[in-house]
Image: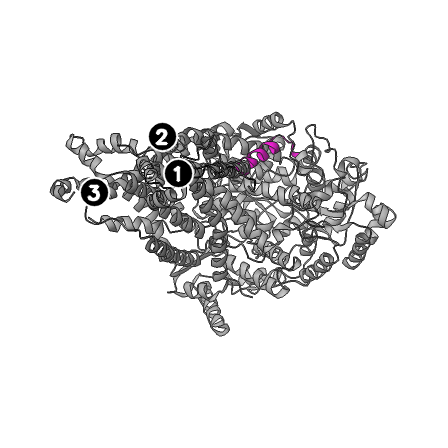
Amino acid sequence: MKKRLLALTMAMIMVAGTMAACGGNTDQPADNQGAANQGGGEDPGTPDPGVEPDPGVEPAPEVELVTGGDTLTIYCWNDEFKSRVTDHYADYTAVDATHGTIGDTPVEWIITPNEGNGYQNKLDEDLLNGVGIDLFLIEADYALKYVDAEYTLPISALGIEPSEYADQYQYTKDIVTDSNGVLKGLSWQGCPCVMFYNRSIATEVLGSDDPDTVQAAVKDWDTFNETAAQMVDAGYYMTSSVADTYRVYQNNVTTPWVVDGKINIDANLEKWVEDSMAMVEAKETRTHDLWSDDWSAGFMTANNNVFCYFGPAWFINYSMTPRDDDGNPQAGTIGAIGGWGACVGPQSCYWGGTWICAASTCDNMDLVADIMRELTMNPDVMTEIVEADDDFVNNQPAMEAMAKTDYTSDILGGQNPLPLYCEGVLTLDLSNLTAYDQACNEEFQKAMKDYFDGNATYEEALERFYNAVQTKHPELTY
Amino acid sequence: MAQNMQITYDIKGENTGTIKRRRIVAYIVLAFLSLLCLFWFYLLFVNATKSHAELSLGFTAVPSTHLFTNWKQLMKMPLKVLPGLANSIFVAALSAICATYFSAMTAYAIHVYRFAGRKAIATFILAVMMIPTQVTALGFLELIRKFNMMDTFWPLIIPSVAAPATFFYMKQYLDSALPLEIVEAARIDGSGEFRTYNTIIMPIVKPAIAVQAIFTFVASWNNYFTPALILSNENRKTLPILIAQLRSMDWSHLDMGAVYVMIAFSIFPVVVVYLCLSKYIVGGIAAGSVKG
Amino acid sequence: MKSKKSKVVAFNKWGYIFLIPFVVVYSIFQLIPLFTTIYNSFFENYRSGLTVIGPTFIGIDNFGKLFSDKNIWIYFGNTMLMWIIGFLPQILISLLLGAWFSDNRLRLKASGFFKTVIYLPNLIMASAFSLLFFALLSDGGPINSILIALHLRTEPFHFFSSITASRVIVGFINFLMWFGNTTILLMAGMLGIDTSLYEAAEVDGANSRQKFFRVTLPLLRPILIYVVITSLIGGLQMFDVPQILTKGAGSPAGSTMTLIMHLNQHLYSKNLGMGGALSVVLFVLTGILSIIVFKMSGFKLEDD
């Protein structure tokens, strides 16, 4: 049975190999070079997602801007970007909910919700069929799928020079840099995470709720785990769920999910499994899904049983502390009594963020470039966004200047978290992303939950993970 | 049920005590099932009366006071809720009409006429009922693009003309409820075939039509997958797409209270349609009897 | 009928005319995609990111790959098990209700109300149901509070981490959503039964039980066959409830993964080859099971 399976797999690989050969892999050298840049990223034998011949979109650096298209068509999944453009892009005039104008050019917003992968399904079909998309938005989890395809224009093709976006955080550029080292998207947001800890629990167990004291108790994973033992002795959970720390471990991997077409599990993820299992067994954490009622129960004073969560500014401001009708922190949440503190935590990570990309069918390149320049590079507009929308923006000097002000957060008991965000974000290195990250991250967490819950052994869970990823990405082996 | 009862017998030999006992059991079971069915509507209503922040505090069964605020919040959002309602009604109603009228017509053809290939066609339609719809979705989409029908309602309505499950049900119903003599009698009276179908047959199969109309209406009403791929113009979106859109709001705008109000709002019209059609179905045995 | 045969034949061309709308729409919107599906199952054809791989003809390799994966049988088992968990109570309760509602000696009051109410859960979307179930069954939710208050448990029961509980929840939601539907189908069938048959049975001294088994059930057979077949087909294609409830994971440990959920995983990379092969297998499987039910029930299209 095993032999036959092997033979079949071999046959599949050979077919895939032939495919790659037939696929006209003309820019193979470029691909290799890209892989070298990435520190051994993509497998040259894997069909390169960016090589389907499609004339007219050769990403040459000296491309003439295509301008004067009929309508500026924008694809997105919710209103966030639209409200940023409406509020902060001076030339935009809204006509109705999904139409507007920039100068004489009409703007149309095509909004497809994320649910059931709806947005990507719609975007994929329309990109592949050459429906005239000008600008579309992507998220980090699946960024490389679009970045590594010729349907997305390099930023340089829009006439934007690297010096113009030098102030942006490096990690936001890592995420949208394709396997050849070409930058293909820009973001106005930075979403660095810090560790939010429950001040009353810190005082009780660690003797102080001072950020430095707490940071000393969580400075690396081993110390973090020792503190977790103290927490459980005092009747608290260290984290709400194993899912809380996943992002932190995952953002600090040193190898990508896929090496030479083979699924690769980084040592830091193995450590996550090991540490998490120990924590679950010691009842220091649980296995709830993110956003489930049980996971978020620790946001409430009535429960007051979870020591820490990891997250960016939007997470503490809106998710951990939902607002009541008047926009004030909801009574009954720990945030409403200023009960949270912030420190850097064992390792840094990011969570969320939206990137702007130009489609290869873009015929309003000047407008797209101008929107990118205004929203992601203009310090005045970006400072405006910080003030109006509580966003952490993608501009290092602007944010560091803000950090030096006397800004304080009531939710964080009067602490100014901005220096922490600014500090953590610099250590982020996201050069190990692959186009398979969304599938790998989702399936790895799902499979390991079975292991933590005692429904599978580690080997069974791993097998399930490999199977699921291979079903989603038939070109991969393990 | 262990209490002593005076045992009496009616003329037909059935124990009236037993009937009473069976009636009590029936009422208890029915009451329980009804509660089980209505409970979910109560929960949705309760959640629709809560603000986003209250919902995040955890579950309680007591209604709150934010129903109207949530509704106002929903109306303030850039979602075309009322056009969405009209779109959903249009698509679901036309789908239900197409599915029932034409599939019943097909079943009638198979039931009444004897022509070459009749059995083959009937068997084939039954076989196709067994194909999962998910995998044909991509081919379907390609087809719609070729026909230039993207972002229109037609790809959501026209395919329901050929509804194998509705056909099968109609066929089964005609087998048990339509003697061929009725058709022959109509012919003797000089009625044309189309007229016979429209004026004599349709009224006879009314309960079956009502049943299938409801099923098709509800299925179309709750459909998210296909409409999400086909409809992109804000003015043409149906309610399930709008609900999904509400749930994909960014974190500073996510309002679960508005989501629940929207869910409650989109269930309300189907309940009305169902109540209208249900009188044909639940009229009861005594009122029914065989027609014709 | 035989005596009038020649006359009837003259009308039979109308059979073709009546079939036109169905057949035309059917051929365009379902037959073409169907043949494409079968055709695709012999090709390697998927997307790597946005790059289309294939189509390359690979014979029956997709099927070989499909059957070399032991999971496919587990998923089939899961699907059938969860269908049965939902369907058995559904058909039993529907028949019981049907019997009660059709029993004119039971004289149930407010039966119109009951008949109306039981279908209502079907009007709630599966996604709304899952929101409510998550709230009810969470660790801090009302069900666990009750279990703890009654001292049935000392700590919360993780419903969605238990294989049995997860399957029962899926079966239960399906039962809840569809038992009213089944009851309505059966009642609509019962409307077609001539009341004089019941009166005749009563004159012959039949009791309720006898009337139900001797009159109602046999006459209801065509509709019963319909109910079983469509429910079986619907069961084999079970998707939305477990998909939404487990976010596509079929958790815990793949115990609620159905065949169509697995198909959906293949569609993530638009894998028309493997997706097509799995669809063909599903089609054959459904066909075989349907034939068994048809044969057991003695169903046949009446002859000329």
Seen from the viewer's position, the closer of residues C28 and C92 is C92
Subunit that carries the residue with mark 3: B
Residue labelled with disc 3: B113
Check disc 3: other Cα within 10 Å, few if <14, some if 14-19, many if 20+: many
Q: Is residue C248 above or below residue A256?
A: above
Element carrying mark 3: loop
Q: Distance between the residues labelled 1 and 3?
A: 28 Å
Identify the residue shown where x is 45% and y is 50%.
C235
* Residue span colored magenta: B36-52
Identify the amino acid type marked 1: Met
Element carrying mark 2: helix
Residue labelled with disc 1: C187
Please check whether the numbered discs 1 and 2 fall on a single chain: no
Check disc 1: other Cα within 10 Å, few if <14, some if 14-19, many if 20+: many
Subunit that carries the residue with mark 1: C
Seen from the viewer's position, the closer of residues A104 and B231 is B231
Identify the amino acid type marked 2: Ala
Magenta stretch encompasses residue B51? yes
Position of C27 with respect to C247 (left or right) is left
The picture places residue B6, in percent across and down from the top left corner, at: 51, 37
Residue B230 visible to an observer of this rendering = no
Magenta stretch encompasses residue A339? no
Seen from the viewer's position, the closer of residues A126 and B162 is B162
Q: Is residue B99 above or below residue C232?
A: above
Q: Total number of numbered labels?
A: 3
Residue labelled with disc 2: B287
Judged by depth in the image, the label closer to the viewer, 3 or 2, is: 2
Residue A3 visible to an observer of this rendering = yes
